[in-house]
Image (tube, rainbow, N blue to C red):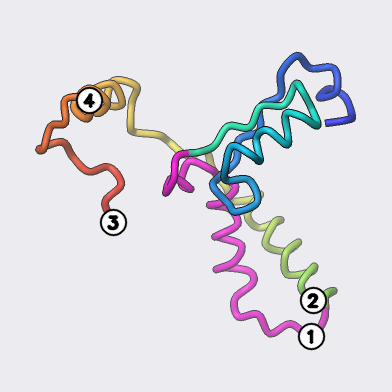
Amino acid sequence: MTTEPYASARRVFWIVDNGASHRNWAAAKRMNDAYPNAHMIHLPVHASWLNQVEIYFSAVQRKALTPDDFCDLDEVAARLLAFQNRYNATARPFDWTFTRADLHELLHRLGRHDPHAPQPFAA
């Protein structure tokens, strides 16, 4: 926040999950007191799928760091770099199928408390 372009920006939005270190309004106030142009925006609870870096870290954990029987930190670094190179070579943009119209309909149905509305977050 002390370097450009953030220091001179009128507003900087920090999108955060609900982790313990930044879950409540006190965390947002601490950030805003330290950096008046900073605004902390919390993702909805149980919505880590909205945070794309969480998805990436999950893939790193499952595909690169498991099992975690490394001899030293150099081996960890090598594994992470190899994963990064492979991931960057094969990653493709996600093709969203849930449209703005779908979202509008879902919100409308939820707003009416429709018991037949699909449960978008069901496991």
| For the residues bearing labels 1 and 2, Cβ distance under 8 angstroms | yes
Q: Which residue is mark 1?
A: 71
Q: Which residue is mark 2?
A: 75
| For the residues bearing labels 3 and 1, Cβ distance under 8 angstroms | no
Question: Which three-letter amino acid code belongs to the residue tagged 2?
Answer: Glu
Q: Which residue is mark 4?
A: 111
Label 3 and label 1: CA atoms lie apart by 37 Å
- For the C terminus, the image quarter is bottom left
Query: Secondary structure under badge 1?
Result: loop
Label 4 and label 2: CA atoms lie apart by 52 Å
Q: Using the image, determine if residue 41 lies above or below residue 105.
A: below
Nearer to me, 101 or 85: 101
| For the residues bearing labels 4 and 3, Cβ distance under 8 angstroms | no
Query: Secondary structure under badge 4?
Result: helix
Which quadrant of the figure has residue 8?
top right
Furthest toward the front, the residue is 26
Q: Name the residue located 16 percent from the left edge and 31 percent from the top edge.
A: 113
Q: Using the image, determine if residue 73 lies above or below residue 12.
A: below
Which x, y percent locates residue 105?
23, 23
Which x, y percent locates residue 48?
48, 48
Q: Earlier in the sequence, mark 4 or mark 2?
A: 2
Q: Earlier in the sequence, mark 4 or mark 3?
A: 4
What span is colored magenta in the figure? Answer: 44-72
Nearer to me, 109 or 40: 40
Q: Earlier in the sequence, mark 1 or mark 4?
A: 1
Query: Dot 1, crowdedness within 10 Å: few (<14), some or many (≥20)?
Result: few
Query: Dot 2, crowdedness within 10 Å: few (<14), some or many (≥20)?
Result: few
Question: Which three-letter amino acid code belongs to the residue tagged 1?
Answer: Cys
Which quadrant of the figure has residue 45?
top left
Label 4 and label 3: CA atoms lie apart by 22 Å
Left or right of residue 65: residue 38 = right
